[in-house]
Amino acid sequence: MTKIAVFGAGSWGTAFSIVLADAGNDVTIWGRREEVCATINERRENTDYLPGIELPPVVSATHDAEKAVDGAEVVVLAVPSQTLRANLIEWAPVLPSGAVLVSLMKGVELGSLKRMSEVVAEVTGAGPERIAVVSGPNLSHEIARREPAASVVACTDEDVVQRLQAIVHSPTFRPYTSVDVVGCELGGAYKNVVALAVGMAVGLGYGDNATASVITRGLAETARLATRRGANPLTLMGLAGLGDLVATCSSPLSRNRTFGERLGQGMTTEQIYASTRQVAEGAKSSSSLLALARDSGVDAPIAEAVDAVIAGHLTAPDLVTAMLSRDTKAETD
């Protein structure tokens, strides 16, 4: 059994722990709140984030970071993207020097405009052969219920990524390998912003024509930015691009789509934050992704409009007007 530490006891960290356990690994979850860790250990359930789902016996939880990583060969990072740096600074002294660090996070850091793997490298000093990402159409509640799913494991080192592929391959979770870390990360981050726009369309009462249009143009916008930053265009057509985009934009389980729906129904960003404990990464990362697009010289009308709604400068109906009134052009421009 491979010893794996998962930092983050939220929905996705807990669901991925189930995948790892089903794949034959020994898993320790680090949780920020001691009461969540206690419930996991005593009741075999994360009642705050995945109520009703029994956790495998090989999954345990602790609030002690040093205990969590004791003997770990792989450390999985599953905290909100905008808190990663602060958390890593705290955890770095106890991280095993040879452990592979795997990011499940989908965002771009505010201010620095760094992808999550870049933040990991900067804070820990780990080389690219020790940093990997997992991205794909992976709604946490479906994963936790062991419904079939596929994903992409990416690392620039092919030997490492093949090892990780074997470690995370469970009876219901099928991982594919990639060396395109940039494409996987930007596809995963940008789809959250597109899902916010789709959610607004749904909240406004629009149908499938509107949502399909937003999804398609959102994919084009994502691909423009990712390829400008060095990604393989084929990555954006795969699980970490189109697959993740479709799942996040189409499912009512998606936190970002739900956040967008509430904006479309007239709620403010502050009201939505006050009503839920769950983090919608797109709402946090829309401004950093827009800044990254501008820094890259890429036109990003969806990110620009979504960020304006999040900031309260536009309403959801204003967003629709802004998008439809743009100058017409060829689809491939």
Image (spheres, helix red, strand yellow):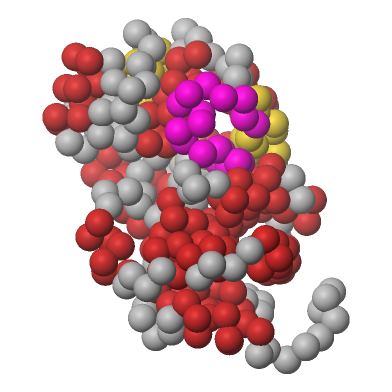
Q: Quadrant of residue 32?
A: top left
* Residue beneath the point at 24% across and 44% down: 90
Number of numbered discs on residues: 0
Q: Is residue 330 something one can see in this rendering? A: yes
Left or right? Give the position of 160 relative to 75.
right
Asked if one can make out residue 70 in the rendered structure from this viewpoint, the answer is no
- Depicted 114 relative to depicted 240: above or below: below
Q: Give the image location of residue 47, x and y in percent.
A: 26, 28
Residue at figure coordinates x 65%, y 31% from the top left: 150
Query: Is 300 situated left or right of 78 in this image?
Result: right
Q: Residue at x 17, y 22 (%)?
A: 38
Q: Magenta includes 148?
A: yes
Going by the picture, which residue comes out furthest to the left?
Answer: 35
Viewer-proximal residue among 315 and 33 = 315
Q: Which residues are magenta?
A: 132-150
Residue 101, compared with residue 228, is above or below; it is above
